Amino acid sequence: MTNSKINEAEIEITMRCNLNCEGCYKWDSRHIGRELSIDEWEKVIDNLKTCGIKLVNLIGGEPTVVPKIDELISYINSKPGIDYIFSTNGVIAEPILKKLLKAGLKNVIVSVDGIFKESEIREKKYEDRVYKSIVGLKLLRQLKKEGVKELSANFTVMRKNIDQILPTHEMLASEGFLFNLIPLQFLKYGLPEEYPIRLVEADRPKLTGVLKRLMEIKKKPGNKIVNSIVFLRNFADFAIKQNFKCRQLRLLGITRNGKITYCVGQDGEIGESQEFNALELTPEKLQDLFRKWSKDIIGNACPGCTFTCRDKTNDFDYLEKPGDEKYRNYWFYYKQKIK
């Protein structure tokens, strides 16, 4: 049996992006197609709220390439009872950023996969990842000056940036930014020799040493690490194996055309048939989706991803003490902090 209720949704508002980072699955051809208008997204927000969704994560692609994205931010800000996280690669044109700030932008997560000098952009193989890390850090600093509330960085762990984890956390934490460690989602891409940024068993000793230090830091006040100790202790398995599956439906996924999927990008039978659409979502239809989930996913439709890795911390073997089940959910921190 799955949960009878969930309270968050991940909205892939667009699959367009102003970067093309190695390892990103957003360029898959299945993401090409119609995008909802801002007016339609506002209706989606209303429907989600009616269904008990309290938090949405606006992702892409890159959300800031969507015309009038500031109007959607203003709309959600005006709706009591539902809030948002805004995820960006940090590459935002200044006129768009000004509109977002005027709309009341908050709760921003920026991709920062290491600390680099601007001269290194030309020297690194994965140029867009290096570029977005440089620009992302600048954006966090700019948003802090503008008084934006809740600023965080996602650090995606790859083979070549393990040594960057600790210094990146130290810099971000020293400036008051939250730090979130995430595994690379690689399952769509093949063997390690064909995919050189993918973590393998040979990386485990170095990664384990870094994680041990992060766990020590996590126990100290003001550490700015979002991840739980439970998650950090098991992160090497998550990042190297990444073959864990959800036992319960954790969140609702919504694609750029309003189609509802299980979690993020996991269609299952309901996605392939486009049976559910957020423009027509009601509490009754959501309950119908819950009923379909268990037999659809148990049929091996889902191979596991970064989200199922996070959710693995909800399994009994990974609990440190009563109450740790709260860490099943990546957004737990935000759901406690966001008002």
Image: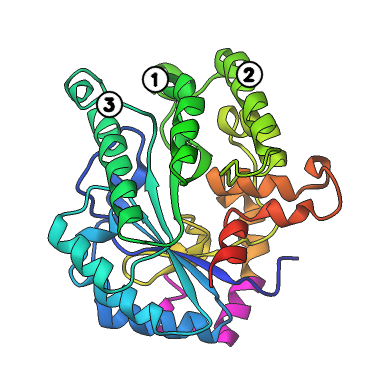
Name the residue located 30 percent from the left edge and 60 percent from the top edge: 146
Indicate the position of residue 164 as horizontal and vertical percent values: 44, 24
Furthest toward the left, the residue is 95
Q: Which is nearer the N-term, disc 1 or disc 3? A: 3
Q: Residues within 10 Å of mark 2 (few under 14, many from 20)?
A: few
The residue lying toward the viewer, choosing from 274 and 231, is 231
- For the point 28% across and 48% down, the residue is 139
The answer to whether 288 is drawn above or below residue 28 in the figure is below
Q: Earlier in the sequence, mark 3 or mark 2?
A: 3
Residue type at the position of mark 1: Pro
Per the rendered image, the range of residues in magenta is: 274-291
Q: Which mark is residue 103?
A: none
User: Which residue is under mark 2?
Assistant: 209
Whether 331 is among the magenta residues is no
Question: What residue did someone put label 3 on?
Answer: 126
Seen from the viewer's position, the closer of residues 140 and 201 is 140
What residue did someone put label 1 on? 196
Which of disc 1 and disc 2 is earlier in sequence?
A: 1
- Find the distance from the CA under tag 2 to the CA under tag 1: 21 Å
Instruction: Say whether residue 170 is left or right of residue 91.
Output: right
Q: Position of residue 115 (x, y in %)?
A: 35, 28
**Image position of 81 with respect to 19: above or below:** below
Q: Is residue 140 left or right of residue 102?
A: right
The kind of residue on which mark 2 rests is Gly
